[in-house]
Amino acid sequence: MISYKGYNAVDLHVNGETREVVIKPSETLLSVLRDKIGLTGPKAGCENGDCGACTVLLEGQPVKSCLVLAVEAIGKKVVTVEGLHDTEVQKAFVEESGFQCGYCTAGFIVNSYALLEENPDADASEKVEWLSSNLCRCTGYEDIEKAVDSAQRIKNNSESR
């Protein structure tokens, strides 16, 4: 086990790029992504893992980056919403107006992307279960659900060709 003390220069693999950052062992992945790398897609909402606004992919799995120490991401692939540009999910959220104020949107997009990667044929109950890990205070979730359904149709149609 590697022990970190004080400040450390480390390499993080974020959105396909290796980024050298200086971190303290106590810093969260969220704070490093936003404050040191400049990726503002993941948002600091509740900062205790309840809202999902800070969701990123860590080795392909959605995690709440406010609950992950940056040192835990060393040697692993991190993908933020910025790394999902031009994906079916992102396009569907725009086309279906799956957002209102937009604060929670990045977390929903990342989580929805992970769902459709893991289970492209997810049924309605699986989608509800996955989306329940993210909170939106502005909408009734209807347009968010439409966006996920639309992304699923587009993704499945493009893969069947």
Image (cartoon, helix red, strand yellow):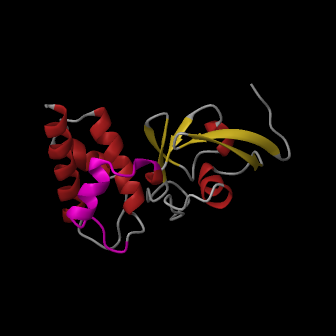
What is the residue that sits farthest to the top in this orientation?
Answer: 1
Quarter residue 39 falls in = bottom right
Foreground residue among 143 and 93: 93
Residue 133: tell me if it is visible.
Answer: no
Q: Is residue 130 above or below residue 72?
A: below
Is residue 107 highlighted in magenta? no
Foreground residue among 9 and 127: 9
Is residue 86 highlighted in magenta? yes
Q: Please tell me which residue is depicted at 57% across the width and 53% down the height of the picture.
A: 66
Quadrant of image for the N terminus: top right
Q: Is residue 30 left or right of residue 97?
A: right
Foreground residue among 118 and 153: 153
Quarter residue 52 falls in = bottom left
Q: Please tell me which residue is depicted at 24% across the width and 56% down the height of the picture.
A: 92
Q: Where does the image place residue 5, in percent across and percent down from the top left?
A: 84, 41
Q: Where does the image place residue 158, in percent across and percent down from the top left?
A: 18, 38
Q: Is residue 83 left or right of residue 21?
A: left
Q: Please tell me which residue is depicted at 58% across the width and 41% down the height of the picture.
A: 17
Foreground residue among 125 and 71: 71
Q: Is residue 28 above or below residue 160?
A: below
Start-end of magenta stretch? 83-101
Q: Is residue 127 left or right of residue 138?
A: left
Quadrant of image for the C terminus: top left
Q: Where does the image place residue 38, in percent across and percent down from the top left?
A: 61, 59
Q: Please tell me which residue is depicted at 81% across the width and 43% down the height of the picture.
A: 8
Residue 150: tell me if it is visible.
Answer: yes
